């Protein structure tokens, strides 16, 4: 239980730091957010928990394939905001698009021989 709390605190601190930095410099905040800190922490914690190379390799591979459908969200949201659409609607549309693309990726990957079982 202590490890779970520690992991949650570390993750929360990272998100808070990104938010604080982004208030002063949106570009720097975006740069920090784009660094795969959470994925890297996930790798470290998974390795510490399992010590299993195959499990970690599968995790990293799945993280890559599931990262790709998130990219259009980062184009759609700023475009909508700059077009005068409200923040919440822009965010909802970006999240909705990402969910649709996740479902597409889940359907596509097995067809091209990539196993990222959920």
Image (tube, rainbow, N blue to C red):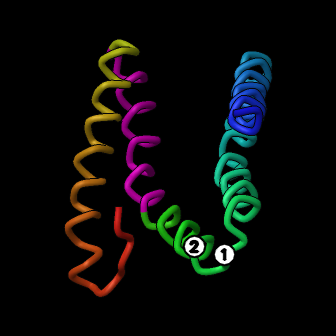
The quarter of the rendered structure image containing the N terminus is top right
**Residue for point 79% across, 25% down:** 17
Instruction: Kindly check if marks 1 and 2 are in contact, taking CB atoms under 8 A apart as contact.
Output: yes
Drawn side of residue 67 relative to residue 31, left or right: left
Q: Give the residue furthest to the bottom.
A: 113
Instruction: Label the magenta part by its dominant secondary structure.
Output: helix
Which residue, given by chain and number where applicable, does mark 1 sit on? 52
Viewer-proximal residue among 6 and 83: 6
Name which quarter of the figure residue 7 lies in. top right
* Residue range (magenta): 66-85
**Residue for point 67% across, 46% down:** 38
**Residue for point 73% across, 21% down:** 16
Q: Where is residue 59 in the image (x, y as percent from the top left)?
A: 55, 66
Q: Where is residue 97 in the image (x, y as percent from the top left)?
A: 27, 42
Q: Does the magenta stretch include residue 83?
A: yes
**Residue for point 75% across, 27% down:** 9
- How dense is the environment of label 1, judged by Cα within 10 Å: few (below 14), some, or many (20 and up)? few
Which residue, given by chain and number where applicable, does mark 2 sit on? 55
Viewer-proximal residue among 49 and 106: 49
Q: Where is residue 100 in the image (x, y as percent from the top left)?
A: 22, 47
Name which quarter of the figure residue 110 lies in. bottom left
* For residue 110, above or below residue 68: below
Q: Is mark 1 on a helix, strand or loop?
A: loop
């Amino acid at each position: 239980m202590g490890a779970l709390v520690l992991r949650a605190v570390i993750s929360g601190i990272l998100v808070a730091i990104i938010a604080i930095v982004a208030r002063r410099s949106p570009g720097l905040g975006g740069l920090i957010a784009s660094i795969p800190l959470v994925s890297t922490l996930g790798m470290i914690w998974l390795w510490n928990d399992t010590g299993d190379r195959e499990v970690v390799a599968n995790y990293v591979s799945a993280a890559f394939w599931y990262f790709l459908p998130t990219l259009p969200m980062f184009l759609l949201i700023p475009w909508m905001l700059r077009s005068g659409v409200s923040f919440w609607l822009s965010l909802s549309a970006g999240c909705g698009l990402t969910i649709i693309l996740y479902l597409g990726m889940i359907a596509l990957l097995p067809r091209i021989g990539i196993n990222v079982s959920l």
